[in-house]
Amino acid sequence: MTAWQGARVRVAFIGKGGSGKSAIGGVFCRLLARETGKQVVAIDSDPLPGLALSLGIPSDDTPLPPDLLEKTNDGSPNADDSWQLRDGMSAIDAVHQYAAEGPDGVRLLQFGKLHGHVRTLAGSQQAFRVIVGGLEETDAHLVGDLPGGTRQPFFGWGDFADVLVVVAEATPSSMLSAKRLARVRERARGGDQTIVAVANKAVDPSDSERLAEASGLRVIGAVPKDPAMGAAERAGRSLLDHSPDAPAVEAVRSLLATLQGETR
Amino acid sequence: MKIAVVGKGGAGKTTTSAVLARTLARGGRSVVALDCDTNPNLGLSLGLGMEATEALLTLRDGVGDEVEHAHTWAEIVERFGADAPDGVRLAVVSQIEDPDFGCP
């Protein structure tokens, strides 16, 4: 495929909890890797597991050691940009060392799962942010699976993305969440992110229209309600390994082609 | 009795909470349903509809600088809550509106 040549994909999936961000995101990453042959880094900033399974990666936690970082300047205040990766380590090195490799060569970079008190995650979280920041300069494709709800996407976790894709069902709660995400996005700083929506678990074409009307967002695709998706989730397997020819896989493939027009 | 419903996104927390609240209310109890999600949808599950749910004030609105403070939790729920079916009183704790806030 040549359509993606030269393009660097920077996409983050957002939406209500349970809307299907991880399920779609995992398939999206693997198809993107197959079609472009380039490194795809799946960025999981959700402290609950999900993306690993849909990518087909058995381990769901590969924490980043806090000693990955060093201070750039001992005299500076403790601001975000006063930390860098330790000497000799680039963001892509860190990915090769600490991001689990899954099928189709996709690397899963994880924020670190919540095992104990939130405080123990602080160093790992800082390292995660620095690596994601460093990856923006590379040629790797970046695909983010953000925590559910309306809060996280605009507190820095989705900053790397050129395109925010809201995954929503045509249910009132999911559509209302999409509308809120659009509204909070409108008020967020730095308005250079595109925001679009995808109808998930769609049962008929009117689902996309209803989602567009309720959320005010441009709906760029629909993934049908597909029993194979639920079966793969219950089996704890990637849909691509469980049912490679499922209609939902085909729909994500179309979504990938459509998003090419949204990418710089 | 105080009940908190927790779980993964999409697991059914909101639906479970709403059915619990209305069932308890139908059984004659006085029920306050608290929506503690920063993406609050409990109003929908209680049967308020999209417009009414969107129009709900949050309790956070009640502790801002512009309005005179309520002095008790009952007063807060009275002033900032909304009536849902079966006599459930719904109160929304917080909702994300401003992406610049560090906390909800």
Image: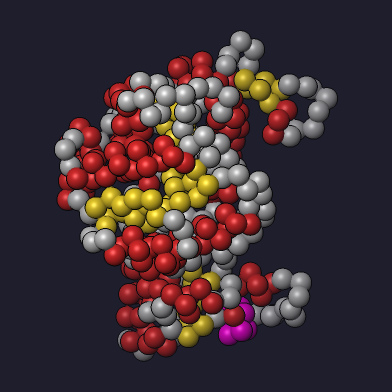
In the foreground, A206 or A129: A206
- Magenta segment: B73-79
The spot of residue A24 in percent (x, y) is 33, 43
Work out whether residue A188 or residue B44 is closer to the camera in this orientation and state it.
A188
Q: Quadrant of the rendered structure where residue B78 is?
A: bottom right
Q: Quadrant of residue A234?
A: top left
Please give the name of the residue rendered at 48% of the width and 85% of the height, measured from the top-left corner. B83
Note whether A111 is above or below B19 in the view shown. Answer: above
Residue A98 position within the rendered picture, expressed as x and y whole percent measured from the top left: 46, 21
Horizontal relation, residue B77 to residue A247: left or right: right
Residue A28 falls left or right of residue B43? left
Q: Is residue A143 left or right of residue B56?
A: left
Q: What residue appears at the point 54 percent right and 22 percent down from the top-left corner?
A: A138
| Quarter of the figure that contains the N terminus of chain A | top left
Give whichever of A130, A168 is nearer the camera: A168
Q: Quadrant of residue A246?
A: top left
Magenta segment: does it hold A62? no
Q: Position of residue A28 (x, y in %)?
A: 34, 37
Using residue A13 as the reference point, say whether residue A82 is left or right of it.
right
Label the magenta part by its dominant secondary structure. helix
Identify which residue is drawn at 63% across, 69% down: B60
